[in-house]
Amino acid sequence: MTSLVDASTGTHGRLAEIGGERSFRRRLMEMGLLPGTPIRVVRRANIEGLVEIEVRGCHLTLRKSEASALLLQS
Amino acid sequence: MTDTRTATGTPLVAIAGNPNVGKTSLFNRLTGQDLKVTNYPGVTVERHVGHTRLTGAGHVEVLDVPGTYSLSGRSAEEQIAIQAIAGLEGNQTPDLLVMAVDSTQLSRNLYLVLQVLELGVPTVVALTMTDMLSRRGQRLDAEALERALGVPVVRMVCHRGEGVDELRAAMDRVLTDPSQGRPGWRWRPEHPALLEDIDQVARLVPENWAGGNQDKRWAFGLWALLSLDDEDELQSIPAELRAIVAERRARADADGREIESQVIRGRYQWIDEHAASAVISTAPPARSRTERLDTALLHPIFGFAIFLLAMGVLFQSLFSWADPAIGLVETAFGAIANGIENVMPPSLARDFLVEGVIAGVGSVVVFLPQILLLFFLIGLMEDTGYMARVAYLMDRVMNKLGLHGRAFVPMLSGFACAVPAVMATRTMESRRHRMITMMAIPLMTCSARLPVYTLLIAALFPPTTVLGFLPVQGMLMVAMYVFSTIIALIAAGVMGKFVFKGPQVPLLLELPPYRVPHWASVLRMMWQRASLFLSEAGRVILICTIILWVLLSFPQNPALETDYDALRTETVAAIENPAAQEEALGELEAQEANDIFLQSYGARLGHAIEPVIEPLGYDWKIGVGLIGAFAAREVFISTMGVVYGVGDAVDEESATLREHIRNETYADGSPVYTPLVGLSLMVFIALSCQCMSTLAAVYRETKAWRWPAFLFTYMTLLAWVASFAVYQGGRALGLG
């Protein structure tokens, strides 16, 4: 499993695990980020410390600190 | 709560859905121009209600509910949405929910739909953005979705009005036929332990929530189990319900079972099985236009440069485009005041009307051109999708201050007026972030500070250039904007560290696809915010202007009046030329106002605060101006007009007032205003909270007096210390 932080731009994969603080995890899951959900890494902004992903037709941006708790199936 | 009619007998239809799915344009299409704005029970969040007539159900009330992703949202607006949908906290349960569903993001939108279906509220689904979907080469099988959901599904293109008649027919069907639009649960939790959790919680759900309906009680039990925690601010939740939720969650945690995951996965499993098949792709997916645009607009260098350019255009337009309209407003109110003065004989009532009421209304309306323009541009940035990119680009800076990039967006509105900006913090999901942002917003250079800067800069600084091309006056103005923004950001950082301590709040920012703006909705957003300014700030400004008029015109002095009456008679007799006569009479009137002022309560107040402001380089007259500025900072100018006997009908362009400022001296002949005093005064205006409307708005949003009190105290102290440093520091350097 790789962490979302380490996945390079353009990676397609499925989520394996959603970690992080409880209420934030609930928000991610309610927006459809669940184990098995396909995602795509759209952009990694190293200077800004952000990762943009596409999930269920929607573009979401997370900070790297939270993205590190999202694991992808390899 | 199960009865289908309201107290007045009119059914209530609520339009709900995720944020930015076109709820408001749907609302407009259904209700036309008829809109009533009231408040939600217990809070001052506007409740937009319209009316429409359906063939069968007759007259219905239509409510525009704020957007939310789920029924567990945490921002002030999301919690309002939850209460309005579920009929909590004194809200009436809707008789029908029209769920706006973005067809390009079907599964995420259906999550909320499943939640409301569980609660048993009759529902119709309105599919929006279907034109965007077909542009992507996809199609939605509405009939399949309708079969799966068990509620009417109507495909719409709101800005073209397509689907509106079908939607009205579907609404009518569900309202009049109890067998339609109420399919209940689409999925069922299966895990025995979870079923036990829900049973236990459901037993403590208040009787009036479910109205005797067992399925509904159970749905509320599940909702409570998933959504109640120590972060929600719902007031009407019984303590025993909270207690059982906490207990069941702790028990699940101990068993290594996560309730959230079980429930949310259950819903999404249903969605993936039933809804994914409703979307039919007719073309292979391509890298979207939005992604290509973002490569440039989110670029760490080009993206930032484009952002700065956009800000530059925003402010340039603020200065240059709003000016003619401001002039027009000033002329119009001058003409009204003149008209009244010509019609009414001189009296206290006339003075009250002209100098209190008309001047008060005028000082509200004069801000409208800039505020409308700024909110138009902000609305444009939101509607095109660029605003989310601003949050993206600003996140790095804001993160250092313990905030989100999203907090920058309401701060941007602070450049127009702090009152709507403070209200815009309602969309922030963390209360801590919201408080920090609210406390920093009033430091942004709002449109009321602008005329004060214009007056002081024009009066005290030479219209020359430095380095051959940089105009001194223009640079100073830019410097004031940069200064205020930096101070506001620092203040936010300091407050996050010392006043509102708490954990970092994670960022989850949605980047919507770019789209051509819908002008109607941009204009509507602009007008909604401007009318917030008019109603909320306007009332306070008007009252303050009237109080100020009393302070500056009382106590009345009959002897003085007799003297001036005699002088007026003399002038009329001595000067034949009507124009010259009018000019002389005008001068007399200004002098009289000045004489009254010198004896007034306002002047006494100015004298009283003089010792405090003397170290900043101000005399008591400036002190009176600063007191006047409480109504709105711009009122500083007309107050100084009265103070210097120029009359109160002056604006920042008034040559006479500038002249008086330059020539004002102390008893020893030294000038009151030096450029250094001007600078110190501008710093004071920039940092102090001389604005009653802002204080009132912060009170309404926080419902506690200690926050406006804190805001006022910290800003005033900050302003005093900074102005002291500028003035005394400048003098030590021999600058003034």
Image (cartoon, coloured by chain):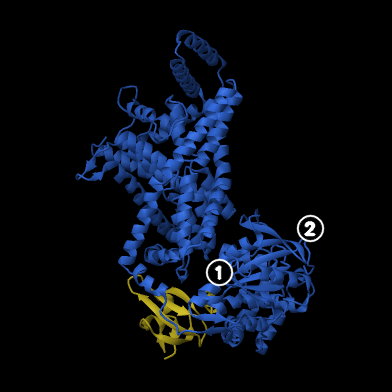
Chain colours: A yellow, B blue
Residue at 40%, 35% in the rendered image: B652
Q: Chain of mark 2?
A: B
Q: Are marks 2 and 1 on the same chain?
A: yes
Depth check: A22 or B180 in front? B180
User: Residue B286 placed where, x, y %?
Assistant: 42, 81
User: Residue B200 placed where, x, y %?
Assistant: 71, 80
Residue at 34%, 66% in the rendered image: B303
Position of residue B167 in the picture relative to residue B619 (left or right): right
Q: Quadrant of the C terminus of chain B?
A: top left
Q: Chain of mark 1?
A: B
**Location of residue B360 (image quadrant):** top right
Mark number, residue B21: 1
The answer to whether residue B696 is seen in the rendering is yes
Kindly report the distance in space between the C-alpha atoms of the residues bearing marks 2 and 1. 31 Å
Position of residue B668 in the picture relative to residue B61 (left or right): left
Q: Quadrant of the N terminus of chain B?
A: bottom right
Residue B313 vertical placement versus B635 (above, below): below
* Tag 1: amino acid: Val
* Tag 2: amino acid: Thr
Depth check: B71 or B37 in front? B37
Q: Outermost residue, bottom direction?
A: A74
User: Residue B399 placed where, x, y %?
Assistant: 40, 66
Residue at 56%, 32% in the rendered image: B356
Which residue does the numbered mark 2 point to in the structure image? B8
